[in-house]
Image: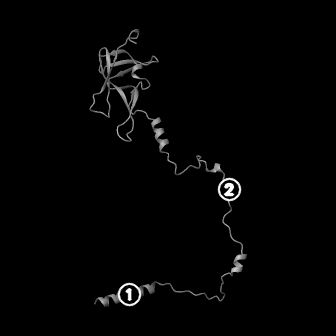
Amino acid sequence: MKRVFGALLLGGACTLVSACEEPVVTSSSTTATRAPSAAAASSAPVEQGPPRVEFQESEFAETDRSRDPFRSYEDLIVAEVRGNLRSQRNVVLDEFSIDELRLIGIVTGIEPAKAMLVDPKGKGHVVERGQFIGRSELVQGTGVGAPNFEINWRIDRIREGDIVLVREDPNNPDVPSATRVIALRPEGDATLQ
């Protein structure tokens, strides 16, 4: 039974192969083409490729129209991002350090309490609890490849004679926040400067 089945399969396969062959077409023309003789081949002009083009070294320089596709732009992008890095927080007096600011007035009878800080240029700024103030400090992130981040002083409390600033370190949440106090300095008081 197996032999009969195998023979049928083999016969069917042969029939399919012969049915798939294309018919052979013969030429009716009586002229035959001959291969050129060796003597004729040597006397024929040799075809050359396209004309030779001479390049100048300046053509290989990188320009806006022709840039290197294998050049890595990662360093340029990272430098640009770091250069344009601005805090995502709304920071008051972000161009001055805390040491440059003077507290000249406090209003505690209202909610929220307000205080007035004067920058080195003599301009006054009204601040309240919860606002971030002063120039940011850049802190290196922990771990390999961790990005740097900015930290700012935040107004924690406004009291009768001073304001209390705190600064949390996101790298070390278990460490207590840094605290700083800016005492009230009336404008005419030169001894406290």
Kindly check if marks 2 and 1 are in contact, taking CB atoms under 8 A apart as contact: no
The vertical placement of 90 against 146, above or below, is above
* Residue depicted at 71% across the width and 76% down the height: 42
Place residue 166 in its image quadrant. top left
The residue nearer to you, when weighing 131 against 151, is 151
Dot placed on the residue nearer the N-terminal end, 2 or 1? 1
Q: Residues within 10 Å of mark 1 (few under 14, many from 20)?
A: few
Q: Is residue 57 left or right of residue 120?
A: right
The residue nearer to you, when weighing 53 against 163, is 53
Type of the residue with mark 1: Gly
Q: CA distance from mark 2 to mark 1?
A: 64 Å
Residue identified by numbered label 1: 12
The image position of residue 144, as x and y in percent, is 37, 41
Any mark on residue 174, and which? none
The image position of residue 72, as x and y in percent, is 50, 47
Residue identified by numbered label 2: 54
The vertical placement of 60 against 49, above or below, is above
The image position of residue 14, as x and y in percent, is 41, 87
The residue nearer to you, when weighing 127 against 40, is 40
Disc 1 on helix, strand or loop?
helix
Q: Is residue 76 left or right of residue 28?
A: left
Q: Residues within 10 Å of mark 2 (few under 14, many from 20)?
A: few
State the quadrant of the N terminus.
bottom left
Disc 2 on helix, strand or loop?
loop
For marks 2 and 1, give the one nearer the viewer: 2
Type of the residue with mark 2: Glu
The image position of residue 20, as x and y in percent, is 46, 83
The vertical placement of 22 against 71, above or below, is below
* Residue depicted at 48% across the width and 42% down the height: 75
The vertical placement of 184 against 87, above or below, is above
